Amino acid sequence: MIMEISRMYMEKCFGKLKSLGIHPRQMPILAVLWKEDGCSQKELASQLGVKPPTVTVSIQRLEKIGIIVRKQDEKDQRISRIYLTEEGKAIINEGMRMAKEGEKQVLNGFSESELCLMKRFCIQIKENIAAMPAPEFSPEEMCMGHFCHNKK
């Protein structure tokens, strides 16, 4: 049931994000930069739980379409910092508005007590997932949509 709900929700979100000119897999990068603009690629990858090369292609694409910009670190010229452009900030703000609108639609028709219970259930589900054994595939494989079912 959770997988089906997740799939349905992501299909709806994909269309909305596509209308903003970004791919859903780029949204986590933009979200990190929204919280902490000026991350290095290494810091960005760390916050996403992936290796730096995993975010390279997304960073290059976002930079090419003017959503982010790279600038040399003022103190250490070896480090390149990534910033949202004004267009990137506008996209993130619109994405946040769309997310709030989507959440409102998803939760439509639930009473306050049902919403309270649902929040409690979701917290428990997150805790249960966190307690699960580590996957046999890397976060990069999962993040990039590649699932390797072969034993390593």
Image (cartoon, rainbow, N blue to C red):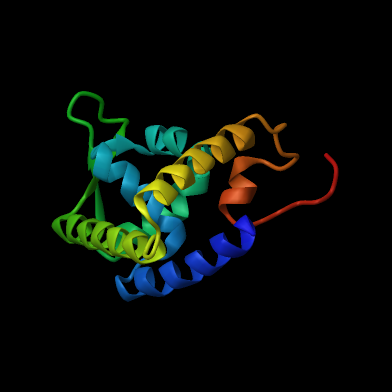
Using the image, determine if residue 103 lies above or below residue 81: below
Any part of residue 82 in sight: no
Q: Is 83 left, or right, of 14 in this rendering?
A: left
Q: Identify the residue at horizontal 69%, vertical 33% (top origin).
A: 132
Q: Identify the residue at horizontal 62%, vertical 49% (top origin).
A: 142
Question: Quarter of the image containing the N terminus?
Answer: bottom right
Question: Quarter of the image containing the C terminus?
Answer: top right
Any part of residue 138 in sight: yes
Q: Is 11 left, or right, of 141 in this rendering?
A: left
Q: Identify the residue at horizontal 61%, vertical 56% (top origin).
A: 2
Nearest the viewer among 102 and 85 is 102
Nearest the viewer among 25 and 39 is 25
Q: Where is residue 94 in the image (x, y as percent from the top left)?
A: 22, 63
Q: Where is residue 26 in the image (x, y as percent from the top left)?
A: 41, 57
Q: Identify the residue at horizontal 43%, vertical 62% (top origin).
A: 24
Q: Where is residue 81 in the image (x, y as percent from the top left)?
A: 27, 38
Quarter assignment of residue 65: bottom left
